[in-house]
Amino acid sequence: SIVSFDLTVEHPYEAINGLIEKMHRSGHISESDHCTFLEAAISFLTDSFRTSLCLQHEPKTIASGIIFLSTVYLRKLPPEGPMVKAYWNLLSISERSIRSICEQVMELYDTNANFAEMRAALHEMGHLPRAAPPSAPPSAPPSAAAAPRAPPPPPPPARQVPPPPVPERHG
């Protein structure tokens, strides 16, 4: 017997572009960082298609998680104060969703030594359950076989970033 079905997946490219534009207008991304930020986000998003994220989250949620990963990767976390709150308001993502997205995308890079410090930083922030996988030889990111990319910038330093604000419950 044959099982047949149609599956339509809405890709988060538009949501990523829109969110990056909002972050640029709000001052979270400078003009000079705009292209680098977009390239990093698209790279993470392309790699995320090797996971089941598109079946678990809405495109805007995936875009927000990918933007967060790109922010950590490029060391562009906002300074303490009002910019942090504005940053989380722009992302509009729950801690549960951001953790799920971080875990699944970072699993793709478990054997890539270039991402060890990024994993450690995400773990320290509470967005990954473990700091680093067992020792493994360095390798290229999964999408590197599909398309050559420039070498990644140095991994970010470990830095505490407050989690997104918890919405108030009424009732």
Image (cartoon, rainbow, N blue to C red):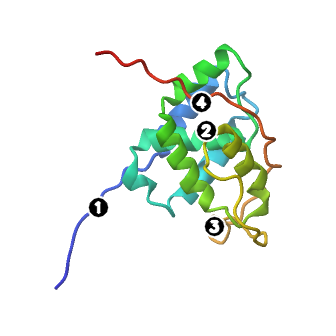
> Mark 4: which secondary structure?
loop
Q: Name the residue carrying label 1.
A: 7
In this rendered view, identify the residue nearer to me: 15 or 76.
76
Q: Residue beneath label 3, please?
A: 142
From the top left corner, tell me how far across and down residue 96 is, in percent.
Answer: 48, 40
Neighbor class of circle 2 (other Cα within 10 Å; few <14, some 14-19, many 20+) is many
Mark 2 or mark 4, earlier in chain: 2
Q: Tag 3, which secondary structure?
A: helix
| Residue at 73% across, 33% down | 76
Foreground of the two, 9 or 73: 73
Q: Which of marks 1 and 4 is in front?
A: 4
Residue drawn at the location 42% of the way across and 44% of the way down: 59
Mark identifier at residue 163: 4
Mark 1 to mark 4: distance in Å? 34 Å
Crowding at mark 4 (Cα within 10 Å: few <14, some 14-19, many 20+) = some
Which quarter shows the N terminus? bottom left
Left or right placement of residue 118 versus residue 59 in this view: right
Could you tell which of marks 3 and 2 lies nearer the N-terminus? 2
Amino acid type at mark 3: Pro
Residue 74 x %, y %: 74, 41
Q: Where is residue 160 in the image (x, y as percent from the top left)?
A: 72, 32
Q: Do the residues labelled 2 and 4 touch (CB within 8 Å)?
A: no
Q: Mark 4, mark 3: which one is toward the viewer?
A: 4
Please indicate, yes or no, whether residue 59 appears anywhere in the rendered image: yes
Query: What residue do we see at 59% from left, 39% from top?
Result: 67
Looking at the rendered structure, the kind of residue marked 4 is Pro
Tag 2 residue? 68
For disc 1, the neighbor class at 10 Å (few under 14, some 14 to 19, many from 20) is: few
